Image (cartoon, helix red, strand yellow):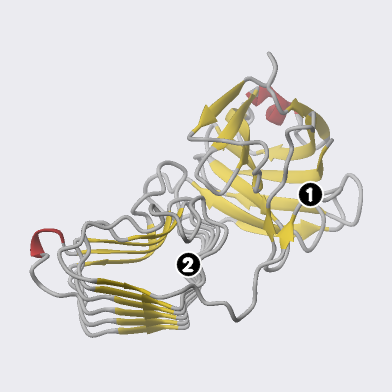
Amino acid sequence: NYTNNCYIDHNDCSHVNRQTDPSDCAAILLIVSNNNTVEYNDLTYSGDGVFLGQYEHSGVPNNNYFAYNDCSFSPHNAIEATFADGNIYKYNKCNYSHYGFWLGYSFNSLVEGNEIIGNRYLPNDEFLIRTKLAGNLVWQPVATDGPRHTVMNAPPCDMAEPDANWQIYADPGYGHRFVETLEWDYEVKKVGRAAVKMVTPRGWDVAINYRPPGDSVALWSLSESDTLFLWIRTIKNPPFGFQACHIRVGCYNHGYYKYAVSESVFTNAHKHWSRLAIPLRGSRTFHRTEEGFMDLNQVSYVEIHADTWGFGYTLWGGWCAVF
């Protein structure tokens, strides 16, 4: 808060998120912050790429400048500004999010040449930018030049193979800052070249999240598919094992299906491989609940969650596929 006259550039601030509501959890958060220049930052996969607002200080102009930032893949808004005055947004990537821009109660904004594709609401939709303006909004066409993300239209035959993009999302818990490790294990594997391996010293929920390799994005239609198959292996540091586990299948619009998995499945996979066959429509064994709005025709990720009693465990994900 109250950050003024700064130049923020060429930082990797990606994957700033949390397990619960991602709104207002931002890669860059500027509250009552003015005359800043924010350029060439990676703000992808965060609750918001950018969030700024003046609130009770809305009579004071922001005059911030945002350019050439990648704010894409937010489950909420790529860029959100509320009660904000005089901000300029040029040549940013605001793709594959809930909203590309949300400028509620903003004033005198310039939005020019940004790439806004693949969001829940299309660029020409009146809800792409929700504004109640006391000034002017200058809206220029979406940039047509520059690279575009490759869309993966079907899941690979094995998501747990090298070159896939796995990331860790961990509940921060309390006290000491813990650090997880995530790597490809070429020795301990079920099939293929390797398995994805995560080690955590944490005692709270930790998720590993699959997305396509490189700069690709997933947009899978799984309405005709039946089952998600997954091999898991664990090392339970506390002898009594895991206390909560589930699998998520989700989309970019902040919706997902949550499939409950008995904690005994992860506990009994201690030092050996165990196969999960999860019906996408749920079952008595894998009870399915819906969070937000989820559509099996717009699937974009798979996520494995586990929470241990005590502290620390190791988790491998082996062959992972949908049929």
Position of the C terminus by quadrant: top right
Q: Nearer the viewer, residue 278 or 95?
A: 95
Q: Which mark is residue 154?
A: 1
Position of the N terminus by quadrant: bottom left
- Inspect the image, locate mark 2, and give the three-letter code of the amino acid beneath it: Cys
- Inspect the image, locate mark 1, and give the three-letter code of the amino acid beneath it: Ala
Q: Residue at x 20, y 68 (%)?
A: 107
- For residue 152, what is the image quadrant? bottom right
For the residues labelled 2 and 1, the Cα–Cα distance comes to 24 Å
Q: Is residue 258 left or right of residue 271?
A: left
Q: Position of residue 273 (x, y in %)?
A: 83, 36
Kindly state the secondary structure of the residue where label 2 is placed: loop
Q: Position of residue 101 (x, y in %)?
A: 39, 61
Residue at which label 2 appears: 71
Q: Position of residue 29 (x, y in %)?
A: 31, 65
| Residue 81 against residue 3 in the figure, above or below | above
Q: Nearer the viewer, residue 175 or 265?
A: 265
